[in-house]
Amino acid sequence: MEAVAGSGAQGGPAGGGKKKKTMKKLQRYWEGAPQPDPPAAASPKAKRRRNEKTRPRAGAKGSPEARKGLRVSGAAGRISGKRDPFPGAAPLPRHKVKKFQRGRKSQLAGASSRRLRDHLALLEQKVELAAQQAARMELLLPEEPGFLEGDPGEDTCTIAQADIAQAADIASATKHFELTLNQFGPYRMDYTRPGRHLLLGGRRGHVAALDWQTKSLLCEINVMETVTDVTWLHTETMFAVSQRRWLYVYDNQGVELNCLKRFNGVLRMEFLPYHFLLATASETGFLQYLDISVGTEVATICTRGGRLGVMGQNPANAIVHLGHSNGTVTLWSPNVKEPLVRMLCHQGGVRAVAVDSSGTYMATSGLDRKLRVYDLRAYQPLQSLVLPVGAGHLSFSQRGMLAAACGDVVQVYRDVPVQPPHKPYLSHTLPRAAHGLRFCPLEDVLGVGHGSGFTSLLVPGAGQANFDALENNPFRSRKQRQEWEVKALMEKIPSELITLDAGQLGRVDAITMEQKHQERVERLGFDPQATPAFQPRRKLKGRSSAGSLLRRKKKVANEEQRTKIRKSLEQQQAAEREPKAAPRAQRSALDRFRK
Amino acid sequence: MRVKVLSRNPDDYIRETKQDLQRVPRNYDPALHPFEVPREYMRALNATKLERVFAKPFLASLDGHRDGVNCMAKDPQSLSTVLSGACDGEVKIWNLTKRECIRTLQAHEGFVRGICTRFCGTSFFTVGDDKTVKHWKIDGPGYAGEEEPLHTILGKTVYTGIDHHWKEAVFATCGHQVDIWDEQRTSPICSLTWGVDSISSVKFNPIETYLLGSCASDRNIVLYDMRQSTPLKKVILDMRTNTLCWNPMEAFIFTSASEDHNLYTFDMRFLESPVMVHINHVSAVLDVDFSPTGKEFVCASFDKSIRIFPVDKGRSREVYHTKRMQHVITVKWTSDNKYILCGSDEMNIRLWKANASEKLGVLVPRERAAMNYNQKLKEKFQHHPQIKRIARHHHLPKAIYSQAKELRIMREARWWKELNRRKHSKPGSSPFVSEKKKHIVAVVK
């Protein structure tokens, strides 16, 4: 705080009048009423002095000397005679704006016309302004994400759930609970997208839907059949259950809405919320897509990958990831009958696949007891770590935490793609082996379904703190939900638009000349630019023998090549004929007379 | 151990009473909004579809004339008043808000050839087949008064058009020559001629108010400066120009409606080639009027339709037609940029929306915001083939559709023929002439 001390010394009576004028003080609203002073023209040097230098001096408040120094002499512009001490917009750090920038800037130099260039420049300006305003808006977000810090020397993974619940506030403490359901386990589970409702499906037929925050039950049924997987559809009013033979859709009262017999032997399901597609993977190796808004089967793909017990979706581009028993992970879109990408990830079968919310990283675990993290932009492995038992289930949280269920132990890792963790962030032991695992969206909660019920764990820092109510609102009313549903249906993305790069539609389709030509050929059915093959004219009797025809054909066939070679030879010779200037070192004195 | 677990207080997110607005916290983090581009694309597609669904431009038909409507004029002071002259010499003044005729007067014997209002909006001038120019008050006479003009000027020849100066008490008529009159005198201040022909329309420039443009029946457009006694220059086209209209925002730009189905936008400084050729009509274009923004114009055609063209586009943005509308003779774009009026052969004046799918009336702020957002989306994705296809789709009457098809075939045939001729003649002997230059015969100064 040297600046503070210095200003105190200079602001004193010993400072001298001239000095006082240059060392102006900032007027803050808490520093008492300002004395009315006549506006005097400030020297340009003083005007230039800005926030950084003047800010710390505000610390020296109270003393009369300091208050005298507070006088602001610049009177330009304001009726009150005050000058804005921080003129212009507040500075914004670059990295904060960068978060809101999309794509690259358009190349103004490449624009052909002046009008287009001006238009693009204007657009760029607007885009930049939008990014800046969004970055400024970030300051106003009400919530802060959670965190957990151990005491010095204490590992966070040793902290028990009970301790976290005790240390946290009451509302959060209720989010850690355990449902003991010994009869019909093990349980698969799913959360709705706003994260308020929970769906449980026990293997022996028990299906329950509940509002897990208020712990109120929506419905509880026993379907009297094996349940392999459960998932919510777009809202909390409907869910799909894959049973021993077929796929069923129930509403939140447990009334069966639909039985889809075309979907048999389903093992895993993923719901693609923006496309209203339910992707199912069956034990016979079929990947099927059901459009739940109109009830049609969009695509059926025979993956030829054996029993499909491992499935994950990329939330950023709606590509389905399937894990196979030969250690490969395949990426599928409903539009292509072949996998888009096939990656060999493990020796031995793949046990679990999860993709993070940005769609950049994929975590896989296999029978070789390894947990691997891949970069999906380059399809390169980033980290690999060996877990004692190997993870059977994986899940990424919204803020990039990775939960792995290894037998009856659940471990949560932080920043896995960035650095190989030598210790988990959190660890918890379940009564029996885990069977399903999901982070609750918008909450610091990890739900685990296991052999003897369901456990809700607190994972501070897992969930997105500030939600967007037009996207996912956990506090939405019934009317809001209905309105959201209509809007979401209106902007349902057709399944044809599922590609590896979701932003492709917004880019300029720079088609090459070659492609254009190829498309034209396809459209016309013939190549309009192709030179017709030489057909020698039939000549007089005897001169049109097969041999001579062939000779004539050959002559014409190579004609083009010959002219080309001839030309290049001529050029070469011409270049050789040109007199070369001798290198300076070999030049003799008489060379200067040479023509 | 320090711990903070995410815990939201519902009071911050749920409205207190039912009278409050719902709270909608936003977070613009792109990570929370996946599939931005495809979702925006779908929104743009929906907006484009809805635009076509709501495209119901026809508002009202003003009937009352007993013969074809030959000319119209806007009142510069009142948005709701419009004047129209018919082929039987009758002039009617209309109130557009009430959609009724407020005054009728028998102005001429024979056609009312031209009508124009004074810039102050208190009086108007008409010319007719009876070789007279009449000056009328807009307000009718009191009870039991007689409809009498303020002044009547008897001319020697038939006047075919009239236009008033935008600032001064001067007006111009055309017929055998262009006459410039002072309102107070009964003989013209000056008469301008260039060759012997009949002139069909004359228009004052609204910005450079001393400039005039006229179209003559020997296929030329002549420009005059009122301060000189001789015309400035003229451009000769290959077909007759029916009328022209000056751009109200750019002083040197005017658009001419030609008999050869096209409209030509000229820069008066460079008449050698038009700035833009607007091709879409399938019959002679009879009238043209600019929007007050100067970015678009509307034109009426003999093919029983009116079209709206952006100034810088060669193809029309919109085409309006009804089953009952016959040859459209006159058209006007209202000064609030919202409506279009057209008068046609079958004695009706029709009122259209300038933007076919626009919602009329007061918009709630949310509605306006949604509209602006949709407009921007449509602009952003306008080049995507699916969206372009829907946005371009307009229903056309069968006659116009087949005529357009025929014209296209003819144009293509001509193009091929020219191409073949060029291919088989000496290089350079039959040069390529662009569409813009094709229709200009000469420029004379």
Image (cartoon, helix red, strand yellow):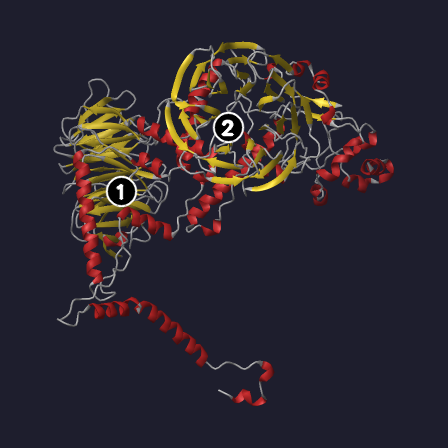
Residue B352 picture location, percent across and down: 27, 28
SS at circle 2 = loop
Marks 2 and 1, how far apart in space? 80 Å
Looking at the picture, which amino acid does disc 2 mark?
A: Gly
Residue B224 picture location, percent across and down: 28, 49
Looking at the picture, which amino acid does disc 1 mark?
A: Lys
Which image quarter: residue A414?
top right
- Above or below for B200 versus A569: above
| Count of number-bearing discs | 2
Say whether residue A58 is left or right of residue B126.
right
Q: Is residue A144 visible?
A: no
Q: Is residue A261 visible?
A: yes
Residue ID for mark 2: A309
The answer to whether tags 2 and 1 share a subunit is no
Which image quarter: residue B316?
top left
Q: Chain of mark 1?
A: B
Say whether residue A17 is left or right of residue B275.
right
Q: Chain of mark 2?
A: A
Say whether residue B176 is left or right of residue A315.
left
Mark 1 neighbour class, 10 Å CA radius: few under 14, some 14 to 19, many 20 or more? many
Which image quarter: residue B382?
top left
In this rendered view, identify the residue nearer to me: A459 or A353.
Answer: A353
Numbered mark located on residue B203 in the image? 1
Residue A228 picture location, percent across and down: 50, 20
Residue B207 picture location, percent across and down: 36, 42
- Above or below for A241 versus B388: above
Numbered mark located on residue A287 in the image? none
SS at circle 1 = strand
In the rendered image, the quadrant that contains the C terminus of chain B is: bottom left
In this rendered view, identify the residue nearer to me: B88 or A416.
Answer: A416
Look at discs 2 and 1 and give the one toward the viewer: 2
In this rendered view, identify the residue nearer to me: A203 or A522.
Answer: A203
